[in-house]
Image (tube, grey):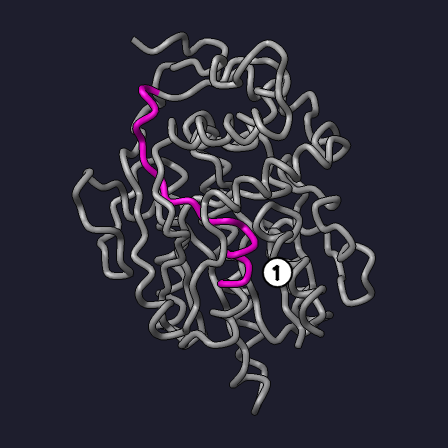
Amino acid sequence: MRVLITGGAGFIGSAVVRQHIAETGATVINIDALTYAGNPESLGDARENPRHVFEHVDIADRAALERVFREHRPDAVMHLAAESHVDRSIEGPAAFVETNVTGTHNLLEAARGYWSKLGGAAKERFRFHHVSTDEVYGDLGPDDPAFTEDTPYAPSSPYSASKAASDHLVRAWHRTYGLPVMITNCSNNYGPYQFPEKLIPLMVLNALDGRPLPVYGRGDNVRDWLYVEDHARALRHVLAHGAVGRTYNIGGRCERTNLEVVHALCAVLDELAPNEQGPYARLIEFVTDRPGHDRRYAIDDTRIANELGWQPTESFETGLRKTVQWSLDNPEWVERVRSGAYRQWIDANYANRGRAA
């Protein structure tokens, strides 16, 4: 099997690539533009494997995408390339529209042109798997039922709006042109190799540096947390067994407030890397909330559990411990991604927020 994976040097994409190479006999064609969060080092041993082919291509480049399809002739596409950080989308939404909406359109058209010329078994087995987020559903109140695949879309941020648009495009290409697609919507991912703008790696690195741990508002926003290796296995499972035209929610069954997450990782750090100045929780600092911050996300994963037999294997506690331990064991990777661009972003996003009232 030949699988084309977009965004394969990113956080979730690299986990999918690593698993495909380590656990299957598939050949992976890895497309990535290598923007700030794309890092070939995140591919680990897969990077030099002869079944891994890297193409430095931006999905904004339609001609380059068509060349990749012609030359590599994939049996399936797993589309993970995306701009994905809400805070960045608030500061600069245009890049999110360009990549998540226009880029997805380009990929759909390149895939459709390739698929339409296939014949027989090759055309029958081709799949286009679009990977999306639970943020397209908007937010929930404290007692609202979790998101199902039938929850109406109500995105709140430029990021989630761009992903909602991409989901709609994928469904339209299935209904209008017959392209054999499937969609997954996941909850918050965490784990090794995550770029340190996201909550958990940011807090781990700040804590180890003795810097403040900035928590938005009062820290009472709730997210469901999904360990990235669990997510990667779910994506592979959907590709292999999911029904064409079907959507599947993927969650970790681990709802936590942001403040609970930060306290939990501080406790793990207190155990694994104790600081002589005292518990890491002393560094927690509440800062002004971001605009339009969704209150709660929660995933109902009944469909993927019942129809496909998938469920997560990591609890939040085991996944968080593995994540913190990985950060402690891989300081070289951490230091290499903490570039000037990363520092500039952190300073721009947090320096002027001030303490929450």
Q: Position of residue 31 (x, y in %)?
A: 66, 55
**Disc 1 secondary structure class:** strand
**Boundaries of the magenta span:** 217-234
Q: Residue at x 77, y 32 (%)?
A: 332
Q: From the viewer's perspective, is 78 left or right of 252?
A: right
How many tags in the picture? 1
Q: Position of residue 121 (x, y in %)?
A: 57, 90
Q: From the viewer's perspective, is 91 left or right of 24?
A: left
Q: From the viewer's perspective, is 81 left or right of 32?
A: left
On whether residue 341 falls in the magenta region, the answer is no
Q: Quadrant of residue 117?
A: bottom right
310 or 21, nearer to the observer: 310
Q: Amino acid at mark 1?
A: Ile
Q: Is residue 125 above or below residue 267?
A: below
Q: Residue at x 65, y 42 (%)?
A: 38
Q: Position of residue 321 (x, y in %)?
A: 56, 40
On whether residue 227 falls in the magenta region, the answer is yes
* Residue, disc 1: 5
Q: Residue at x 16, y 42 (%)?
A: 143
Q: Position of residue 122 (x, y in %)?
A: 59, 85
Q: Quadrant of residue 286?
A: top left
Q: Quadrant of the C terminus?
A: top left
